[in-house]
């Protein structure tokens, strides 16, 4: 179960989930600050005001990263620390720039490669108030472009890996269809408008990077999409097979097809959503064509898989799944995987492996796993001593890393890196602090961090996997005659 020796690996986090210090260093409010202070609470009474206090403790946290052997670290920039009001004509906050400069420098001093996500859900409240944020296609893409340019110009001399957006599907659907995430809108038109804004904002950031920075900075840029892998509920029913495909097109293809193929949204989406799915103009298609081959990698956040069952009746107006019913057991009653500490996540490594082939066949791009992880069953109720003994998480990581090895060596998929979610337990958005995804236990009373066993497991397993099966250094090529690593099969 070896991996190429140059395989990148580390841990991922997001600004709002860990930083705290929301009113310090000149930071402006984001839609998540507002959302977490609504009454009655939509976030289990929790908020990110303090979170893990990473803002003040990042040096200690990077000590942990080093002790875990991480080669890379994925974090996000809080837009409202850089531009407190968010807009292209608003002042830049030098204190915010300095915070991220220090962060980047201390990573580099430790030999850890920074992977920077420009936007992980914490839209400046100022832009939401001014023009509706992602709902205003014309304004938001210009403001995002400006924000991206500032980040490239101020950090790009040292940052060589950029992720434009984290999970546009979640931003659009949970923010504007279900209302489960900030800004909490419930609509059956807004998510599709927001989706288009996200696609074009991404493309503009890629274009700016190409025109103004790539030649000197020589970095790479991509986007992180999320999506489960779907199996047919009845494997003998063609309608369920089609439902599984359709579901993945609604999840991944919605963004992947325009971004990586410069194509319109998947046909199944057009068919179901009609004019609620905004068209791309000729100029917008030109931008997508210009940028599609400039996106260096495909980032995948993967947590679980599900079954998809077709529905007889026409799609409901509020449907965003592709008119399927999602289940965790199939027609025979077989579970998609072992239950974790959160209802939506069951450990599904075989589907992880299948998903890589699905993505690679469709987009043919180098893949980085930009998030993967889980909470252990019952972990929300555990003491520290119980939580650090996280055998379920160890098994989960091991099986998912095995799936990556198989996808690389046997299926010929070009997978270049892996980020475990997350470095430590943190603010799990609408689930608050109860749900623990960390390889480090966070005591939210004292803010003490304690490594869980899974942190040591990852360090050891990558040492072994990257050294090759027999302990010999490998060049990343399988010895069984199959071509791997970047060679499409
Ligand atoms: C990622 O989202 C995020 O990028 C990261 O910030 C987060 O901490 C991590 O996952 C762990 O959750 O069935 O209605 O309860 C993953 C996307 C969105 C997937 C919510 C599961 C379940 C919603 N997740 N979804 S529900």
Image (cartoon, rainbow, N blue to C red):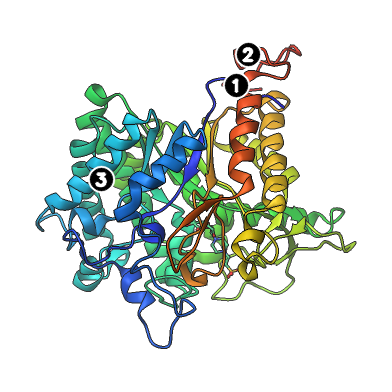
Q: Contact, CB < 8 Å: mark 1 with mark 2?
A: yes
Nearer to the camera, 145 or 259: 145
Does residue 216 appear left or right of residue 436 in this picture? left
Distance, label 1 to label 2, CA atoms, is 7 Å
Binning the other alpha carbons within 10 Å of mark 2 as few (below 14), some (14 to 19) or many (20 upward) gives some
Give the vertical position of 232 relative to 314 (above or below): above
Residue 336 shown left or right of residue 105 in the figure:
right
**Cα distance in 3D space between marks 2 and 3:** 36 Å
Which of pointers 1 and 3 lies earlier in the amino acid sequence?
1
Image point (24%, 41%), residue name: 102
**In the image, which disc is placed on residue 100?**
3
Question: Which mark's residue is nearer the viewer, 1 or 3?
Answer: 3
* Residue drawn at the location 71% of the way across and 28% of the way down: 411
- Nearest to N terminus: mark 2 or mark 3: 3
Q: Are marks 1 and 3 in contact (CB under 8 Å)?
A: no
| Residue 186 against residue 63 in the figure, above or below | below
Return the x and y of residue 454 as percentages of the image width and height.
63, 45
Q: Earlier in the sequence, mark 1 or mark 2?
A: 1
Is the CB of the residue bearing disc 1 within 8 angstroms of ligand 1?
A: no
Q: How many marks?
A: 3
- Identify the mark at residue 310; answer none if there is no mark: none
Identified at 63% across, 57% down, the residue is 247
Residue underneath mark 2: 474
Q: Let me know if residue 118 appears in the view.
A: no
Please give the residue where the numbered disc 1 appears in the rendered image: 4
Q: If the picture is divided into quarters, which one holds ligand 1? A: bottom right
């Amino acid at each position: 179960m070896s991996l190429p020796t140059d395989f990148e690996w580390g841990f991922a986090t997001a600004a709002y989930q860990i930083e705290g210090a929301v009113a310090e260093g000149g930071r402006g409010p984001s839609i998540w600050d507002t959302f977490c202070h609504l009454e009655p609470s939509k976030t289990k009474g929790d908020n990110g005001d303090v979170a893990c206090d990473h803002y003040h403790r990042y040096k200690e946290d990077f000590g942990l990263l080093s002790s875990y052997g991480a080669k890379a670290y994925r974090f996000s920039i809080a837009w409202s620390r850089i531009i407190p009001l968010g807009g292209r004509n608003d002042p830049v906050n030098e204190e915010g720039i300095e915070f991220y400069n220090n962060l980047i420098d201390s990573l580099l001093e430790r030999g850890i490669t920074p992977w920077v996500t420009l936007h992980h859900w914490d839209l400046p409240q100022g832009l939401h108030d001014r023009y509706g944020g992602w709902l205003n296609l014309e304004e938001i893409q210009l403001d995002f472009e400006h924000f991206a340019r500032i980040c490239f110009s101020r950090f790009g001399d040292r940052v060589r890996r950029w992720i434009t957006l984290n999970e546009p599907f979640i931003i659009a659907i949970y923010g504007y269809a279900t209302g489960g995430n900030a800004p909490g809108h419930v609509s059956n038109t807004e998510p599709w408008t927001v989706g288009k804004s996200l696609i074009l904002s991404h493309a503009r950031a890629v274009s700016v990077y190409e025109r103004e920075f790539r030649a000197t900075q020589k970095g790479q840029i991509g986007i992180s999409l999320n999506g489960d892998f779907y199996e047919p509920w009845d494997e003998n029913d063609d309608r369920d097979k089609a439902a599984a495909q359709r579901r993945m097109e609604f999840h991944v293809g919605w963004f992947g097809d325009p971004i990586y193929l410069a194509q319109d949204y998947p046909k199944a989406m057009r068919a179901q959503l009609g004019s609620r799915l905004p068209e791309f103009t000729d100029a917008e298609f030109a931008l997508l064509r210009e940028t599609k081959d400039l996106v260096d990698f495909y980032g995948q956040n993967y947590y679980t898989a599900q079954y998809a069952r077709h529905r007889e009746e026409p799609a409901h107006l509020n449907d965003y799944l592709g008119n399927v019913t999602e289940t965790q057991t199939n027609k025979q009653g077989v579970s998609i995987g072992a239950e974790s500490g959160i209802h939506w996540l069951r450990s599904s490594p075989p589907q992880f492996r299948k998903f890589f082939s699905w993505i690679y066949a469709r987009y043919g791009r180098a893949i980085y796993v930009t998030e993967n992880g889980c909470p252990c069953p019952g972990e929300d109720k555990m003491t520290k001593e119980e939580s650090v003994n996280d055998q379920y998480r160890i098994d989960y990581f091991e099986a998912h890393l095995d799936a990556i090895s198989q996808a690389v060596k046997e299926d010929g998929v070009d997978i270049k890196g892996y980020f475990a979610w997350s470095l430590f337990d943190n603010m799990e958005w609408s689930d608050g602090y109860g749900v623990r995804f960390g390889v480090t236990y966070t005591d939210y009373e004292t803010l003490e961090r304690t490594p869980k066993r899974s942190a040591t497991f990852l360090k050891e397993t990558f040492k072994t996997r990257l050294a090759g099966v027999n302990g010999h250094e490998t060049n990343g090529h399988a010895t069984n005659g199959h071509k791997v690593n970047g060679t499409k099969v």
